[in-house]
Amino acid sequence: MQIDIVSVFPEYFDVTGLSLLGKAQEKGLVTIRAHNLRDWTHDVHHSVDDTPVGGGAGMVMKPEVWGRCLDDLLNVTDGSALQQPTTDQTADTADAEERKEARKSSGDESYGIASEADSSADNHEAGAAKQVLIFPNPSAPLFTQADATELSRAKRLVFGCGRYEGYDARIPVYYRNQGVDVREYSIGDYVLNGGEVAVSVMLEAITRLLPGFMGNPESIVQESYTGDEPLLEYRQYTRPTTWRGMAVPEILTSGDHGKVDRFRRDEAIRRTSRIRPDLIARLDCSALDKQDRRL
Ligand code: 6GU
């Protein structure tokens, strides 16, 4: 996978050379390049932003600079996107529908691009396209584990980090119209200063799913939010079995794997109900067994 990140603070991504992501790059699983948006400015001040049309506080990132930058990175030349969505990936129609609904209400239709919502859904039905352009945006749909899974199958990701009050709304619309698979995501209901931290979060969620990234692929399978059952994980303990007067649950030391599994699943369901009732609402009840139902 090749990842390009555009930011006015490209040094922010020096940390991607560390830890497991650094190792993944050494192993050749992923290549990450951070670019400085100002390299695509033409004026002496290297300005990337301007005041909002219609007034208001703050600054908005200019479309011309982003346009030159993204044309270069995406190989888009005036009116013809070279990128085609692949068709060899599995589909998640329900999710595509959801995305379609979310996009429908996002207001992009005001540019008269009737096919905009449809084309993004088509791309999704075909799985992640070869090349995906991603903009962090606090006003976009939430980035989820399902998005991370889908995007981990892409060949190339280009992240555009917005700063200030955001970026000109025509930028994503333009590239979508060029046939590029463009996504906008928020990472949660709180305010950040810019897209860099959000991109770091998405980058980590996506790259750790690359085949060969994890030493032990099992650790991915068991996680919260993964698979059809979005349950929070059960609590973990290690030795000593008693620490500062607190003993670990006795069943876990019993050696009875059936009982241990049951105990952990009960705990996962109870904790999810209490801490994240929204996840329980999404559970496929037909997948619950008889023992689950008693909870
Ligand atoms: Cl993607 N960007 C910014 N600036 N703030 C956020 C966010 C993104 N997601 C949550 N808050």
Image (tube, rainbow, N blue to C red):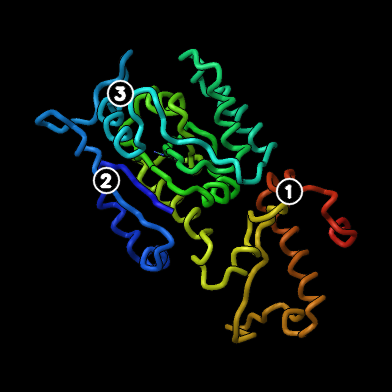
**Frontmost residue, 83 versus 293:** 83
> Circle 3 sits on which residue?
57
> Circle 2 sits on which residue?
35
Is 54 above or below relative to 164?
A: above
Is 54 above or below relative to 121?
A: above
Q: Quadrant of ligand 1?
A: top left
| Residue at position x 57%, y 47% in the image | 150
- Disc assigned to residue 70: none
| Residue at position x 60%, y 86% in the image | 240
Residue 56 spot, x, y in % from top left: 32, 19
| Residue at position x 67%, y 79% in the image | 248
Q: Which quarter of the figure is the N terminus placed in?
A: bottom left
Mark 1 is surrounded, within 10 Å at the Cα level, by few (under 14), some (14 to 19) or many (20 or more) other residues, namely some
Q: The disc labelled 3 sits on which kind of residue?
A: Ala
Q: Are marks 2 and 1 in contact (CB under 8 Å)?
A: no
| Residue at position x 67%, y 81% in the image | 247
Q: The disc labelled 1 sits on which kind of residue?
A: Ile
Mark 3 / mark 1, whichever is N-terminal: 3
Mark 3 / mark 2, whichever is N-terminal: 2
Residue 163 spot, x, y in % from top left: 31, 36
| Side of 5 where 263 appears, left or right | right
Q: Are marks 3 and 2 in contact (CB under 8 Å)?
A: no
Q: Which quarter of the figure is the C terminus placed in?
A: bottom right
> Circle 1 sits on which residue?
280
Mark 2 / mark 1, whichever is N-terminal: 2
**Frontmost residue, 214 versus 284:** 214
Residue 185 spot, x, y in % from top left: 49, 38
* Disc 2 from disc 1: Cα separation: 41 Å
| Side of 231 where 59 appears, left or right | left
* Disc 3 from disc 2: Cα separation: 27 Å
Is disc 2's CB within 8 Å of ligand 1?
Answer: no
Closest to the camera, between mark 2 and mark 1, is 2
